[in-house]
Image: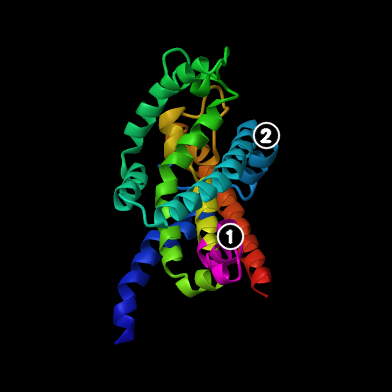
Amino acid sequence: MGWSFIAPNFIGFAILTLVPIVVLFYVALTKWGALGDPQWIGFDNFVKLFTRDPRFNTALWNTFYYTLLHMPLTLAASLGLAVLLNAKIRGAAFFRTAAFFPYITSIVAIAMVWNLMFSPDYGPINQLLRLFGVDNPPGWTVSSTWAMPAVIIVGTWREMGYFMLLFLAGLQTIPGELYEAAKLDGAGAWSRFLHVTLPCLRPTTFFVTVMLTIQSMKVFDLVFVMTEGGPGRSTLVISQLIWQQAFVEGDFGYASAIAVVLFVICLILTLFQFWINRRAER
């Protein structure tokens, strides 16, 4: 009887996730253009990846660049927003909805609006910077230096509302007696945040950190619609390189090899985060 309840989920997981992963590992060891039979070439795709493809090194660096900035920024912004909107303020429900709205808005619409705002000559952001005396404001999405920070800003703005909801759920589980006891001991607001809120939110923070790391490592849609990996290769990330190899150049074997590397990197980072969390629990 119990198997009948879990069977649909297990069958769905096997068909949509487990089998494609197994096929991915096989295709990564072949030369295959989606038509005809795959040609077994062993580890040639991985040798090419690490020794003869400068695009992979660029995409790997850009992906870590995006992750190392986007993850802590989104974590801090979503936590701050959750603490702020967890207080009993007028219109809290409206502000929570407004913060979450970008997450469910079309990514194409978001990219178009932000590209207009980042326009070097006519965008309101640079006009505001000039108003404050910045003579040479950044070129944002048309600059190889500032394109990735622009993508990170938009990514943080878009996703902080979703993770704010997770932190709000965590804040609701903290017993009020802990804050009352801290107040009786003379703890101020900042002290209560450091010694009551943060420790009680550790399971939520760990979950958010893992999810944010994985999402950042496989970022694709935002980069694709905002910059298409440019200018040059300044915002080329691994997921976009996989897409280019598979659907532009038609080399599914090589694209699968890149996907395997991304999978392994995400797995190592996740296991490392679990190891850190277990050490902190002891």
User: Which residue in the protein does label 2 denote?
Assistant: 52
Corner quadrant of residue 108: top left
Identify residue type, mark 1: Gly
Label located before the other in sequence (1 or 2): 2
Q: How many marks?
A: 2
- Quadrant of the drawing holding the C terminus: bottom right
- Looking at the image, which is closer to me, 99 or 49? 99
For residue 228, above or below residue 99: above
Identify residue type, mark 2: Arg
For residue 191, above or below residue 182: above
User: Which residue in the protein does label 1 denote?
Assistant: 188
Specify the segment rendered in magenta.
Answer: 182-204
For residue 37, above or below residue 272: above
Where is residue 75 shown, x and y percent of the image? 53, 50
Where is residue 262 shown, x and y percent of the image? 57, 49
- Looking at the image, which is closer to me, 156 or 217? 156
Does residue 94 appear to the left or right of 155 in the view shown? left
